[in-house]
Image (tube, helix red, strand yellow):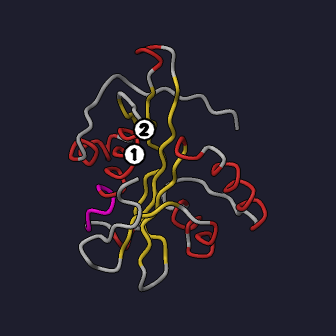
């Protein structure tokens, strides 16, 4: 990934892949600003981190760390789905994009989404897709996405 250690506008922020130590830098607290994120023990975090890492570039979680505070202030993920259609093509699925409430308005969400979309393109995906709320539609349009069809969900828990 070409942007793996890029500094954002020289203000002590960098985009990089998730690291095991990020649990202690507020990663889970950040995810709680997005959705339900129950407490996760250090062992559970390490086990899931290792499991995701086994997928290599097919499942990437990226973060932006404020190097001054040492806190994770933005995150998102992309996973690559391998298909039979489109000549055994690939589709990138962007998930769990979140920017800390105190850091919004700094274009960090755009940086995260751009990083993830660039990764999907570099992996040979013919498209990248995501689901979002109506409130976030304009944001994703600014990131180059367009509305297509509708989302359906069935929860099991």
Report if the CB atoms under discs 1 and 2 are less than 8 Å apart. yes
Residue 119, numbered circle: 1
| Main SS class of the magenta portion in the image | helix
| Residue 55 image offset from top left, x and y in percent | 62, 43
Task: Classify 105 as above or below 139.
Answer: below
Residue 38 picture quarter: bottom right
Q: Residue at 44% of width from left, 72% of height from top? A: 65
Residue 151 picture quarter: top left
Task: Classify 138 as above or below 67.
Answer: above
| Residue 94 image offset from top left, x and y in percent | 44, 42
Q: Residue at 76% of width from left, 65% of height from top? A: 41
| Residue 34 image offset from top left, x and y in percent | 49, 55
Give the Cα distance between marks 1 and 2.
6 Å
Q: Report the quarter where the C terminus lies.
A: top right
According to the image, label 2 marks what residue? 123
Assign a secondary structure to mark 2.
loop
Residue 22 picture quarter: bottom right
Q: Nearer the viewer, residue 96 or 19?
A: 19
Q: Is residue 157 left or right of residue 25?
A: right
Residue 95: in magenta span: no
Q: How many marks?
A: 2
Q: Residue at 55% of width from left, 44% of height from top? A: 59
Q: Residue at 25% of width from left, 46% of height from top? A: 143
Q: Is residue 25 left or right of residue 54?
A: left
> Label 1: how many residues lie within 10 Å, few (<14), some (14-19) or many (20+)?
many
| Residue 137 image offset from top left, x and y in percent | 29, 42
Residue 79, numbered circle: none
What span is in magenta?
A: 106-110
């Amino acid at each position: 990934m070409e942007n793996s250690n890029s500094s954002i506008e020289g203000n002590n922020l960098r985009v990089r892949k998730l690291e095991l130590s990020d649990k202690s830098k507020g990663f889970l607290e950040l995810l709680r600003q997005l959705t339900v994120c129950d407490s996760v023990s250090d062992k559970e975090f390490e086990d899931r981190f290792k499991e995701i890492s086994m997928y290599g570039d097919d499942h990437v979680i990226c973060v932006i760390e404020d190097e001054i505070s040492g806190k994770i202030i933005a995150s998102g993920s992309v996973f690559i789905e391998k298909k039979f259609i489109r000549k055994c093509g690939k589709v990138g699925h962007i998930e769990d994009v979140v920017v800390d409430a105190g850091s919004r308005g700094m274009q960090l969400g755009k940086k995260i989404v751009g990083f993830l979309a660039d990764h999907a393109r570099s992996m040979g995906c013919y498209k990248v897709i995501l689901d979002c709320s109506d409130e976030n539609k304009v944001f994703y349009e600014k990131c180059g996405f367009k509305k297509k069809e509708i989302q359906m969900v069935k929860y099991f828990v």
